[in-house]
Image (cartoon, rainbow, N blue to C red):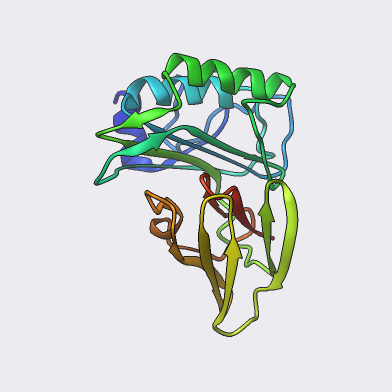
Amino acid sequence: MNRRKFFRVSSLAAAAVTLGNFTNTGKLFASPRSLTGFSLELITDNSPKAIKLAEEFLSGINTGGEIVKFSEYFLDKPESGDIVYFSGCKLMNYKNSVSETSSKLREIAKELNLPKIIHNPIRLKFTIDSSDINAENFLIFNKQKLIHKISASESNLNLTLHGTKSELTVNINSGKARVVSSGCAHRNCVNSGSISKVNESIVCIPNEIHIIAE
């Protein structure tokens, strides 16, 4: 079974030292470096190359025994291709920050010729599967600054935020948060659906808004 077919069938992978060595369980050998909570998302027109680069990047991450969930799907209209990376519930500005991780992400972006407008975009996302932990709060950040902390127990709360490019409205209801409207061009944040589990996130790149479940 080749790499792409394995991912599509199992939807599960784990960071490893040698990511090509799959087992029947979908788990791989863990690497020595630890990390609490992460999400790696790529919008690209070269899915095979992006998956390979993501595997190489994730080879330096130890998930502490957690499973990493992988998803891949096509978007139905042109999109701004880029990389979104959350580490420890913090959105990393890989373009400007100085660190080994941001340097590796810049290399991936260079290999994939990102950012650019993609006419047949594919969205790839790698996240730790925390499906057994319900969120207690939702944290809302603007430009890395925490602007709201809202209890997940709120009932049908709508919050309008003023982003960099436009307004967007977040709805929090019975343990779930979602973006219900946004003035951004591609509305990926709206199409991302709802989040309800710890470490899940929604990001609106044009508005520099991100929402994290904790």
Residue occupying the point 67% across, 25% down = 96
Whether residue 13 sits left or right of residue 197 in the image: it is left
Residue 139 in which image quadrant: bottom right
Whether residue 199 sits left or right of residue 179 in the image: it is right
Tell me if residue 101 can be seen: yes
Residue at far front of view: 165
Q: Position of residue 57 (x, y in %)?
A: 57, 23
The residue lying toward the viewer, choosing from 31 and 120, is: 120
Residue 182 in which image quadrant: bottom left
The residue lying toward the viewer, choosing from 153 and 81, is: 81
**Compared to 3, does 72 lie above or below?**
below
Q: In the rendered image, which quarter contains the C terminus?
A: bottom right
Whether residue 141 sits left or right of residue 202 in the image: it is right
The residue lying toward the viewer, choosing from 24 and 167, is: 167
Tell me if residue 17 can be seen: no
Q: Where is residue 94 in the image (x, y as percent from the top left)?
A: 63, 28
Q: In the rendered image, which quarter contains the N terminus?
A: top left
